[in-house]
Amino acid sequence: MTATATRVLVLNSGSSSVKYQLLDMNPDSRGGPAAGTRLAVGLVERIGEETSRLAHTPLATGGDKRETEGPIADHGAALKAVAAELSADGLGLDSPQLAAIGHRVVHGGLKFTAPTVIDDAVLAEIERLVPVAPLHNPANITGIRTAQALRPDLPQVAVFDTAFHTTMPEYAARYAIDVATADAHRIRRYGFHGTSHAYVSRKTAELLGKDPSEVNVIVLHLGNGASASAVAGGRCVDTSMGLTPLEGLVMGTRSGDIDPAVTFHLKRVAGMSEDDVDVLLNKKSGLVGLCGDNDMREIRRRIDEGDERAELAFDIYIHRLKKYIGAYTAVLGRVDAVAFTAGVGENAAPVRAAALAGLEEMGLAVDADLNAVRSGEPRLISPECARVAAAVVPTDEELEIAQQTYALVSA
Ligand code: ADP
């Protein structure tokens, strides 16, 4: 890596999509870009279809978003198309200023507790984890291989969704099932959204003017997927997602916690196949299963019109959230802050108000005026007198991946 190589390309490869951001991590304050300046952002979706779409925004040049539609056969073609867009802005991936490519990798199992420079052994281990992350790791591997082919000379770094949760104590990470069976099949609670929980818990400490080691935070990452975590002094001690992202909170399309016997029942009594049950619980449950909509804006609009199904879905969502706030308060013993983040957490004031309503005995309260403020900045929504701070802390997983990647390759 040359001294001027300060750019990091962050890639988040899904099964039919690639999200990307090019960031400059130059810490130079003398007229250079600030660390973490976004130079370009974009998305390729519907890869493998006739109607693939690439949307690219060249932030460095201040240019408008460019959108192109047409068939993009595979991830290799997608990354080449992205590289061409970046080149058109003078930000080509062949630039000596590119220091590394940081990949979001969903499942790192127990082995990967930190960001890792990818070599053949690392790639083989990510591949070995495919049985516990069949939907995500194969796409991540394809993204890595494609990027390696494009720039074989460049460090490629894996940043794992599970890494932040590897500090969970064994009693929080183990399911109470037969140990030999669990170990033979690597069945345990891994947790996900780790880069977000790490970033938001640190930012929350910053908002409180404290070091992360001094504060206990409950992070509520409420996007389409949703998870809660209990973070004690900067270390995760519990999280709501488990072996897969299905466990825990009610989500846009996932059920979250459920009696596992429901699955036996569906197979024995309703005659559903394994795959049917998988699709039901992951894609047709949660808010969409309860009321037909998974967008919180639409659900609130329906509630305002007196729609009872939407109201019940909202109440079930909030009830689950409250149970986790209560549980993690008990797990942590002392809570300094509850932080809301991601699409719903950052934007849906009624969700935040309802989740904390009636928890005054636990030191939690919401100031209606502060909660109504719309802003992209971290902010408090609790009154000054509240014993526990409530906050909205926008997440930035790409920045966190870029920071972790750059820290590793520039060390
Ligand atoms: P993902 O899990 O896909 O990354 P996001 O964190 O982007 O999800 O969250 C997407 C969700 O955020 C949407 O499904 C919607 O429910 C919610 N959302 C986004 N904007 C708003 C808003 N202004 N008000 C309420 N909910 C919102």
Image (spheres, helix red, strand yellow):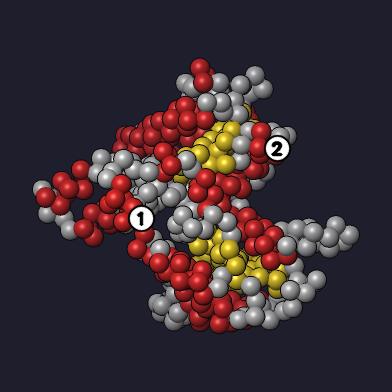
Return the residue at label 1.
186
In the rendered image, residue 80, in percent from the top left (x then y), is placed at: 56, 81
Depicted 384 relative to depicted 64: above or below: above
Q: Amino acid at mark 2?
A: Asp
Depicted 372 relative to depicted 114: above or below: above
Count of numbered circles on the image: 2
Mark 2 or 1: the one toward you = 1
- Residue at the location (78% across, 74% down)? 2
SS state under label 1: loop
Q: Is mark 2 within 8 Å of ligand 1?
A: no
- Residue at the location (50% across, 47% down)? 165
In the rendered image, residue 401, in percent from the top left (x then y), is placed at: 61, 59
Q: Is residue 48 left or right of residue 119?
A: left
Q: Which quarter shows the N terminus?
A: bottom right
Depicted 64 relative to depicted 176: above or below: below
295, 110: nearer the viewer: 110
Q: Amino acid at mark 1?
A: Arg
Q: Residue furthest front?
A: 180
Return the residue at label 2.
211
- Residue at the location (75% across, 67% down)? 6
366, 268: nearer the viewer: 268
Depicted 389 relative to depicted 159: above or below: above
Q: CA distance from mark 2 to mark 1?
A: 35 Å
